[in-house]
Amino acid sequence: MPDDHHKTAARVQPGDPAPYYEAHVFCCVNERPEGHPRGCCKKKGAEALRNYMKARAKELGLMDVRINQSGCLDRCELGPTLVIYPEGIWYSYSSIAEAEEILQTHLIGGKRVERLMLQPGDKLPEDRKK
Ligand code: FES
């Protein structure tokens, strides 16, 4: 999996156009059938979270930030998940308060919500292991 930032940096070539958006956020809203062993983000409330992110970004005037819904990002057990490009930072978020924190701290503040961030080898976030 993409755990080597050097690989990502090497893909950017001199002369490449600037990213179209300052930040492009993909929120998984994928739904799987009931009882699927991997579960899905939609059944964990992803759609309402994505809708909040989108409406709130507009309300906050974040014109260069795009909040898109996405299909499965293949980290279903950690969901709901979102990923922010071009920085390639992943989050597991499960409440409106956490969505707001990502908006305020990451997208507006340029910082990280470290406790919600996913690392390449993560299985389940520490605070959600039962
Ligand atoms: S269902 Fe959301 S990452 Fe797979």
Image (spheres, grey):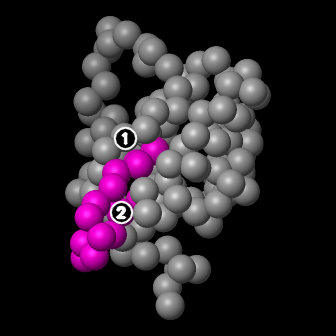
| Ligand 1 within 8 Å, label 2 CB | yes
Give the residue at x 64% y 37%: 107
Of residues 63 and 108, which is closer to you in this image? 63
Residue 31 in sight in this render: yes
Helix, strand or loop for the magenta stretch, by majority: loop
Measured as percent of width and height from the top left, residue 130 is found at 50, 90
Q: How far, Cα to Cα, is label 1 from label 2?
A: 12 Å
Q: Describe residue 88's horizontal placement relative to residue 94 as left or right.
A: left
User: Crowding near pointer 2: few (<14 within 10 Å), some, many (20+)?
Assistant: many
Measured as percent of width and height from the top left, residue 61 is found at 73, 21
Taking the view exactly as shown, the residue that stands out farthest to the front is 34
Image: 51 above or below 76:
above
Measured as percent of width and height from the top left, residue 72 is found at 30, 51
Q: Which residue is mark 2?
A: 40
Image: 16 above or below 32:
above
The magenta stretch is 27-41
Magenta highlight on residue 36: yes
Q: Which residue is mark 1?
A: 70
Q: Quadrant of the N terminus?
A: bottom left
Give the residue at x 41% y 59%: 41
Q: Helix, strand or loop at disc 1?
A: strand
Measured as percent of width and height from the top left, residue 54 is found at 60, 33
Residue type at tag 2: Cys
Quadrant in the picture for residue 96 = bottom right
Image: 6 above or below 3:
above
Magenta highlight on residue 57: no
Image: 117 above or below 63:
below
Q: Describe residue 53's horizontal placement relative to residue 92 as left or right.
A: right
